[in-house]
Image (spheres, helix red, strand yellow):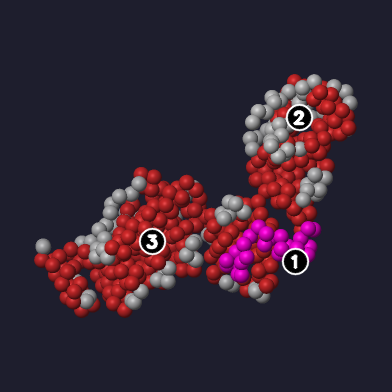
Amino acid sequence: MYCAGPRKETLVRLLLSDGLETVEAWAAALDGEDADGGIVGAVVDSKGNGDQVCAPLIRAINEVVPYLPDYKSVSAKLTALFSYAEEEYSSRVNELIQGWLCGRRHTVRFRRWILLDWLKCGHLTAADLHELLQWRHTLFVAAVNENVKPLKRALVDDLNTVDETIEEQFKDCKVMTETADTAIPSMKTVEELLDFCFLHAEQLATCSLLCAAKLHALAVRTQRSPARLAEDDEVLVRLRWSFLLKPVLFKPLLQHAVALKTMSRKIMTWNSEELGRLVGLVDVTDRVAVLEEMRASRDELERGFRAGVEHIHSSASTSKKQSALETLVAEYLKSLSDEKRKSLMAELERDLDEAPPHLFPSVFLFFGLIFKAMTLFSVPEEQEQDQVVEAVSILCALFDRRSHDPSSYLDVLSLLVRFHGPSNLIWHNNALYLQTIESLSATATLQVEPKFKWATRMVLHQLIFECDVRLLIQNKVNLSKILPPRTMRQVSIRLGAY
């Protein structure tokens, strides 16, 4: 499709000429220019949608207006020009201005004109609901990025204006629910909605108010007051990690969800500063890479289960990116006091217990990084070894607590297999070693669910066949009392090789 080139020179000449301070004046002037092959016409597609394709006037505005040396002398002309363009190409003008606000940083003079002259002309309050939601997202992003205080205040004021306008359109709870339902599939519980929002946060970023409205409607429908929601661990774990990992949707959602108003004031106290900084160390790219590797390991274990594998050999392979990330996490852990490290582990343990299956990998990712840092990089001092013991205890407890979720316990198994847990010096604590072996042996014997029984046996085999052989020699008598005869015969075979 061919688009006629913009006539920047023509637009500059018109802006410098006298008059042209009304929509009618611009219409007459541009019609005259268009008759001479000027800058108004748009290439129209086969359906006649000129507003959806290239408008030379819009291109000319984009190439001229942000770069003017002064706006005071031409403010009235620009306002009239934009009003004319808005009548002709409404959606294109909105897209253009939103792109200016969210895109590359333009001059303060230009940003001031957009915020204090153009947007103050009632354009935000006159928009329909869909446009209001787009404007809300734009203003939010622009306010976050703006560093000039008067302009930041103007953006916040505009944001409040948009919020008030949206709330006016949502006065009727039925309208609120019906409108939200058009954008969000039918949900029956607050938890289902939070899960859906977490999984589709990027696509729903401009619909935070709709999500908040739907959440409020569900809370009312299920008779869950803010006080009840604030005491629900399954809701809280979702909110804590959604806010940490998907702030683009959940930060504005929490600001608008009436059902969560009492919680939103305390949002920053839900997670410790230590956890917040740990999450901040792992950017989105690294997070996705680690999650992909976790998924690949999980799939490999699934294949092992289906093939009836009897033992999984530990692997020393880690990617360079992960090694660098582990080093970064190890350095961060060493910078924390012993008390803060313990608190961080307890915080992760709490959330790993309550996390729903889709959220567990994202939380376990950070526990895994800490575990690897402790086992691979820590100096074997007594305090640090105690923390490794605590981490392993949490890992073994998680394996049992997540028995209802195959993906979760396979993630735990994968971590034990890939990072040499059995070869760590902590197992030279005979009491810990025997206690863990006894617990796993009992679970493997009593468990009836095939996959979990297999996974438990794989962990048990790790501790028996991948450990320092001296452990088996020292504990042979006690092991013979707690292991099944078949497994004990395998232990004897291993000892017979030494």
Q: Earlier in the sequence, mark 1 or mark 3?
A: 1
The residue nearer to you, when weighing 228 against 267, is 228
Q: Tell me where the magenta segment starts and ends, as one range.
A: 168-193
* Secondary-structure class at tag 3: helix
79 w.r.t. 468: above or below: above
Q: Amino acid at mark 1?
A: Lys
Q: Quadrant of residue 209?
A: bottom right
How crowded pointer 2 is (Cα within 10 Å; few <14, some 14-19, many 20+) is rated as many
Marks 1 and 3 sit apart, C-alpha to C-alpha, by 43 Å
| Amino acid at pointer 3 | Asp
Q: Give me the C-alpha separation between circle 1 and circle 2.
A: 43 Å
State the mark number for residue 411: 3
Q: Residue at x 86, y 34 (%)?
A: 23
Q: Position of residue 203 (x, y in %)?
A: 60, 52
The picture places residue 402, in percent across and down from the top left corner, at: 42, 69
Residue 101 pos. (x, y %) = 69, 39
85 relative position to 54: left or right: right
Q: Which residue is mark 2?
A: 41
Q: Tell me whether circle 1 and circle 2 mark residues in contact (CB < 8 Å).
A: no
Side of 308 relative to 76 (left or right): left
Q: Is residue 182 magenta?
A: yes
Where is mark 1, residue-wise? 174
